[in-house]
Image (spheres, coloured by chain):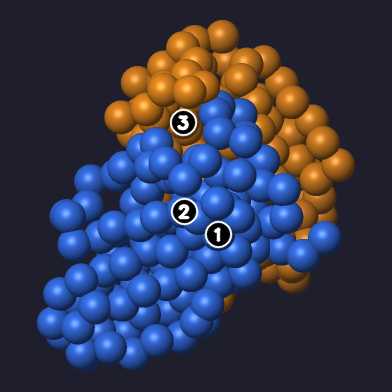
Amino acid sequence: LAKTTQPISMDSYEGQEVNITCSHNNIATNDYITWYQQFPSQGPRFIIQGYKTKVTNEVASLFIPADRKSSTLSLPRVSLSDTAVYYCLVGEGSSGSARQLTFGSGTQLTVLP
Amino acid sequence: KAGVTQTPRYLIKTRGQQVTLSCSPISGHRSVSWYQQTPGQGLQFLFEYFSETQRNKGNFPGRFSGRQFSNSRSEMNVSTLELGDSALYLCASSLVYGQGDEQYFGPGTRLTVT
């Protein structure tokens, strides 16, 4: 299983850029890296997904170095509503074969005014 | 398009009982995964179904089981409930089975075992 490690918590201020890093040393060749956001009493919500290099969408960027042993979620100009738990997810196995889906322990991001 | 729905939203059971939770995926989605979320263990993968077949299973005892119907709806069952089974059970659906599939999560079923 591709175990993941994330910081337990992070604080930031409104308007700042936040970078959350996830370590996944045992990532397999066919694994994708996905980040989810979760608010209290809700299910996780997809933020961004990538395989290598850099991916950007309207809400975040994902940086993956060449060795793919880590990934960094970047949230530009955070607001109070970005206060949530952020999870890194690494899949294992290729399409059609057995796979385990391993979530990181999650990072509680608190955005302060 | 309606999201993933889970029923019931809240449930209280007694030790030794069994429970069945239901999940209706987004229309057109064929893959359904189940997760257990607890404060101590975080989000843990239970199992994944695609085309009515269990494709993957996490490290949970045999008391946890599931199934998927031809309309892609899924149920999970926990028999002989233990206090430690108290958790938020989340269901997620995705369009197809395989790597790189974005999962859409439901609101969860909060199970309390007394």
Quarter location, residue A55: top right
What label does residue B68 carry, if any? 2
Colour applied to chain B: blue
Q: Determine the residue positioned at 61% across, 20% down.
A: A51
Q: Determine the residue positioned at 39% across, 36% down.
A: B55
Name the residue beneath numbered marker 3. Answer: A91
For discs 2 and 3, the disc positioned in front in the rendered view: 2
Name the residue beneath numbered marker 1. Answer: B73
B49 lies left or right of A16:
left
B112 lies left or right of A60:
left
Q: How crowded is mark 3: few (under 14 residues within 10 Å), some or many (20 or more)?
A: many
Measured from the top left, where is residue A56 in percent x and y?
Answer: 79, 30
Quarter location, residue A4: top left
Disc 1 to disc 3, C-alpha distance: 23 Å
- Type of the residue with mark 3: Gly
Chain ID at mark 1: B
Chain with orange colouring? A
